[in-house]
Image: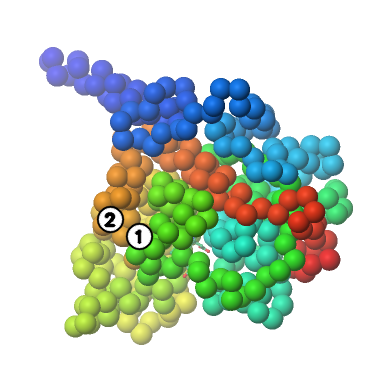
Amino acid sequence: MECANTKPVLVFLILAMASASALGQFGFFPPIPGMPKTPKAPSGAPKAPTGAPGVPNIPFLKPPKGTRIGYYSQSCPRVESVVKATIKKHVDKDKTIAPGLLRLVFHDCFVNGCDASILLEGPDTEKEAGINALLRGYEVVNDVKKEVEKVCPGVVSCADILALAARDSTVEAGAMTYAVPTGRKDGRVSKASDCNNLPSYMDSVEVLKKKFADKGLDTQDLVTLSGGHTVGSVTCQVITYRLYNYTSSGGADPSIDPVFLKTLRALCPFNGDGWRHIPLDYGSEFKFDHSFFTNVKQARGVLESDQRLWEDSSTQDIVQQYIGARGMHGFALNVQFGRAMYKMTNIGLKTEDEGEIRKVCTKIN
Ligand code: HEM
């Protein structure tokens, strides 16, 4: 009897702690031990600008020089609503667009900054690099640009459109929204050879950490952004080596859960169709949620690099944080994902006279 009465109190306490830790990210409460800390702004630091109504700001990250939230509030006040509506139209027709755009912005930002250089067409451009062969969503960005040009010609950069489109896509998939500072300029250079250093699914955690650190992103960002794999798919050709010839005797990667190995082998048979797409977050392909991290913990990570996040002690704790108590830690993931996306989509920006506003996203003016 006594147990039955204390249970709801315990549940409430657990939820309250989880919620406090999540809200602690915003600085409302002290974080509980083990949760990532939010750096405090120095006293007298300029107040972060306020985002659009209802859009949580990232109060502890300052927009890069030359950008601000609401950069187009005078020159193109409708830009964000046009981007949002156009993304919604495309995602409603084809859910695979949302993960496509999220991956597109990652591959743009990691190569010479977020300057839409990935969208430029021509021989030996980034788009032509082998590692970018499976990127998708280009036609959607081009369509968004066309719609934006109708309301404010020559004002909004493709780099800003890409950052907004990635945000709105993840929101369509169920993520919480976050503010995106705008004011990026488009780059004029795009070289396939610059893509050699993009993170690979065969990289060790050490190498991934180094590649992220080179872009100003820390271990927390690495794990959080890998959570982007909560949506989208991978082609069989990328994982076949894990299923059939990982060991010298032709065995599978021993870190895969044996039951899941059977599922993966059924989805990607030996000598089967290498172009077949299978979910990165098995069981929850189109929903932005923390199940990706649960899968990783249960040895059901599809990419080797994702599974390593659990094998490595420096990243395991962060994976565990996102699993935590259901629900509330989903909120913590959302907050951290917005924060990490904010950082990633601000890498190496070209602002003011360092770039241009392209007329169309596929070629320089
Ligand atoms: C940590 C290093 C990363 C590696 C090694 C990696 C690797 C990959 C690979 C191999 C694929 C599947 C490609 C294919 O066969 O179609 C993929 C898909 C994807 N990646 Fe990553 N990725 C990483 C980080 C990220 C980040 C930071 C994001 C964004 C925040 C991201 C978002 C995605 C999405 C959404 C997909 C699914 C794309 C689709 O369905 O079209 N990835 N990634």
Task: Tell me the residue that label 2 is attached to.
Answer: 312
The correct choice, above or below, for 100 with respect to 345 in the image is below
Residue at the spot 37% in from the left edge and 28% down from the top edge: 31
Counting from the top left corner in percent of width and height, residue 227 is at 43, 51
Residue at the spot 43% in from the left edge and 27% down from the top edge: 24
User: Looking at the rendering, in which quadrant would you find the N terminus?
Assistant: top left
Work out whether residue 64 or residue 94 is closer to the camera in this orientation and state it. 64
Work out whether residue 275 or residue 24 is closer to the camera in this orientation and state it. 24
User: Looking at the rendering, in which quadrant would you find the C terminus?
Assistant: bottom right
Tag on residue 205? 1
Label 2 to label 1: alpha-carbon separation: 7 Å
The correct choice, above or below, for 255 with respect to 248 in the image is above
User: Can the viewer see residue 326 in this picture?
Assistant: yes
Q: Determine the secondary structure under disc 1.
A: helix
User: Can the viewer see residue 98 in this picture?
Assistant: no
Counting from the top left corner in percent of width and height, residue 240 is at 35, 76
- Which amino acid lies under the numbered mark 1 shown in the image of this protein? Val
- Choose top left, top right, bottom left or bottom right for residue 158: bottom right
Q: Determine the secondary structure under disc 2.
A: loop
Residue at the spot 85% in from the left edge and 54% down from the top edge: 154
Q: What count of labels does the image hold?
A: 2
Badge 2 vs badge 1, beta-carbon distance below 8 Å: yes
Q: Is residue 259 left or right of residue 137?
A: left
Tag on residue 110? none
Q: Is residue 358 left or right of residue 298?
A: right
Q: Residues within 10 Å of mark 1 (few under 14, many from 20)?
A: many
